Amino acid sequence: MENLNAYPGFYELAATRYSCRNYLPKPVGRDLIAAILDTARLAPSACNRQPWTFIVLDSRQGRQMVLDSYPRDFIKPVGTFIVACARHNESWHRASDGKDHADIDVAIAVEHICLAASSLGLGSCWICNFDHVALHRDLKLPADTEPIAIIPIGYPDPEAKPSPKKRMSLDEIVRWENS
Ligand SMILES: Cc1cc2nc3c(=O)[nH]c(=O)nc-3n(C[C@H](O)[C@H](O)[C@H](O)COP(=O)(O)O)c2cc1C
């Protein structure tokens, strides 16, 4: 696409990031995790409220908490999980209808994390299908703080290939005005 030639780096990053479900049992250093989290810090948020907390779990006990709330084999070799949490008391609520924008804000930050990991050659995966009650309890989170997503960060197994992207076409998802 002609208009994408100006930023091939970003297009390639968006196209190559994928949900990694095959990790090597090789830990990622905290320096890389901090560099990744710094891109979450830069994410936009409604009214710039930044209503988020990112919990890094890289101890045996911390990783077990994640496994307890999301018992899947593919995350067992992962050395670091980031739990992205929304702080609903801090987020912007639209005056007209009270809509809480915390989930949107956290989602943007989480995707920054996933793209940053991919740019560093690391694998990641959005995980939302976890037992949120168990994780909230085990992490001793305050009442207004909700775990939104668990993000495993690890080295992808080079033997495992990502599945091809299945996406709708632009025609299916875009409505152009006056056409
Ligand atoms: C909000 C959200 C929640 C998701 N939850 C899970 C999950 O709990 N477990 C999982 O394996 N993948 C989960 N995924 C990953 C999606 O299945 C994946 O992004 C989608 O199938 C597209 O594949 P791709 O990321 O490889 O391009 C989630 C993705 C999003 C955006």
Image (cartoon, rainbow, N blue to C red):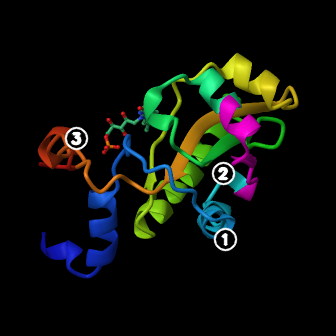
Q: Is residue 49 magenta?
A: yes
Q: Residue at x 76, y 53 (%)?
A: 49
Q: CA distance from mark 3 to mark 2?
A: 25 Å
Q: Which mark is residue 118?
A: none
Total numbered labels: 3
Residue type indicated by callout 3: Ile
Between 88 and 35, the residue placed more toward the observer is: 35
Rendered residue at 67%/37% (across/down): 63
Point 48% across, 40% down: residue? 126
- Left or right position of 59 against 33: right
Instruction: Give the residue pinned by disc 1.
Output: 31
Q: Residue at x 45, y 43 (%)?
A: 125
Instruction: Verify whether residue 23 appears in magenta.
Output: no
Secondary-structure class at tag 3: helix
Q: Which residue is mark 2?
A: 46
Q: Earlier in the sequence, mark 3 or mark 2?
A: 2
Instruction: Name the kind of residue labelled 2 in the image.
Output: Ala
The residue nearer to you, when weighing 102 against 39, is 39
Above or below, 168 against 68 in this view is: below
Looking at the image, can residue 99 be seen? no
Q: Nearer the viewer, mark 1 or mark 2?
A: 1
Q: Secondary structure at mark 1?
A: helix
Q: Position of residue 75 (x, y in %)?
A: 50, 36
User: In terms of image quadrants, where is residue 174?
Assistant: top left
Percent coordinates x, y for residue 103 in the rendering:
61, 37
**Farthest residue, direction bottom:** 6
The residue type indicated by label 1 comes to Asp
Q: What residue does disc 3 label? A: 173
- Select label 1 or label 3 by which is in front: 1
- The segment highlighted magenta reads 48-64
Q: Are marks 1 and 3 in contact (CB under 8 Å)?
A: no
